[in-house]
Structure formats: structure tokens, C-alpha cells
Amino acid sequence: MLLKTKNLMKAFGGLKAIDKVDFELPAGEIRGIIGPNGSGKSTFFNLVSGVYDPDPGSYIEFDGHDITNEPPHKIGALGLSRTFQLLRLYQDMSVINNVMSGYHTRVKYKFLDAVIGRKKIWDQEKEIKDEMMELLSFVGLADYAELNASELSGGQRRLLVLARAIAMKPKLLMLDEPAAGLSPVNVDNLMKIIMQLKDKYGLTLIIIEHILKVVMDTCNTVTVLDHGQKIAEGTPNQVKDDNAVIEAYLGKKMNDEEMRKALAV
């Protein structure tokens, strides 16, 4: 398994945000994580990526490494990259420099090179910039490379965040509501680009998304959280027809026809 959690827990005061969640993700899969507001989806991301420390007794493993209490930069260096609900861009930096900032864990030269090996640094930086321009071209932002990030539209900023995450050359990419605030046309375009990036870079993906159509159309498996607990897991069709899932979203039991209408995609 590329990612595994066992007995994962996180409480804030008396609130159990994540409560004994066991999770396994094989390499190459696209996994969706859904659930009502406050179900623990983003907390799960924050625990796996090292933003939060889990409670005692929890276990997190990534690519064979115990990362339970590792800081974000060490987890990132192992090949785990993520995005956030709120776009975290360097607004006054150019688009290309924003993307290159995601490459920092992959820089090969050392301190001594910076002192005596300037040509080596220049050659490597040119190589990195060329590679990042290719990535920007792939997501449709090459023409905006020298603009400040603040000059991009909302949809373009989401593509830039995605490109920066890919620049880390991750084995696992975790996307926290990548389609938030986008029009239906831009949602379709974003998901098409994400699928192309998965194929091009051999990614494993976890997607948190409130737009159920995105999850149902793209994910191999869907995990459902509610009140910090895993209440269902299976194929999109299996999850869509699960009574516990419907009740979590709508607060009542429904017959089969009502369920299909509620989760129509």
C-alpha cells in the first residue's frame, strides 16, 4: 500500500475530528473522500500531510515509511504533495516562480556549489525552469509565466496551485476541493487536466470534493466520513446506494428512488 493509516485519531478539546480511521490506498488509484461539512475530511488531509500531529495510538505509513509524527517538509520530500481549500500562492511572485517554489525539495546542488560552482547552479536552474515551463504549458498557463499570480483569474489560480503541487514530483497528490468556486465548464476542464496529469506523471490521487459529480466520474473508490468516522467505502455506485451515506448527507432514511435522485450525477 502506498498510504496506510491505522487507528488514526485527532481531537480538538472534546471534539473527535477523526475517530479511529483505518485507511488503505494502493499505488495508482484515484480515491475520493466525501462527507458532510465537519465530517473530518480536511483534518484527515492535515494529519496525513503533517500539518497536524495525530493523537497517541495513531499510525500513518507512506511508501513504507512511518510518517506518524514527521513534519510536512520531510513528508513532502518522500513524495507526498497536497493542495489546500484556500489558495496559498505567492501573489507578488510570477507564475513561473510560484511553480519553481514547488521544486525546492528536489534541488540537487549543495551549499558549496553556491559558493564556488556558479555555472553548475545556473545550468541546473535553466534546466528546472525549462521543465517548469513545460508543466505550465501542459496546464495552459505558459503564456502567463511572467505575470504575477495576483493577475490570474480564479480558475487559472487553481491550475497554478495544481502545477506547483505537481512540480514537487509527488508519488501521491492530495487535492482538497480542487473545483471549489469554478463554473461547470471550468470544473470539467480542471478534471480533464487532472486526469491527463495523472497519466503523464504516474500519480496516485486522493480528492476531497463537495461536487459529487467530480468524485463519481473520476474515482475508482470512494471513502465516506461522518463525524470523524469512516461510515462507508466502495465503488462510486456502491457508495451512492448506501443508506448510511444518504442519511449522513440528508439526515433521514430514504427509499432507493429517493436516494438516486439525491445523489444524481
Image (cartoon, rainbow, N blue to C red):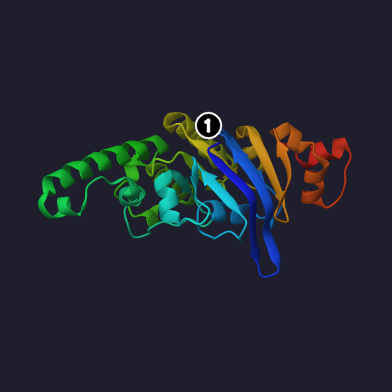
Residue at label 1? 28
Quadrant of the drawing holding the N terminus: top right
Q: Quadrant of the C terminus?
A: top right
Residue 13's x, y, as percent? 66, 70
Q: Is 114 left, or right, of 200 in this rendering? A: left
Q: Secondary structure at mark 1?
A: loop
Instruction: In the displayed orientation, state which residue is furthest to the bottom.
Output: 13
Say which residue appears at 45% left-offset and 31% top-offset.
202
- The residue located at (21%, 42%) in the rendering is 124
Is residue 178 in view?
no
**Could you tell me the amino acid type at mark 1?**
Gly
Residue occupying image coordinates x 39% and y 35%? 138
> In the displayed structure, does residue 149 sit left or right of residue 28?
left
Side of 70 relative to 245 (left or right):
left
Considering depth in this image, is 194 or 81 the residue closer to the camera?
A: 81
Farthest-out residue, front? 57
Give the camera-side residue of 205 and 255. Answer: 205
Please state if 241 lies on the left or on the right of 97 as rendered.
Answer: right
Residue 213 place in picture, x, y as percent: 66, 38
Camera sees residue 7:
yes
Residue 212 is situated, as x and y percent measured from the top left of the image, at: 67, 42
Q: Residues within 10 Å of mark 1 (few under 14, many from 20)?
A: some
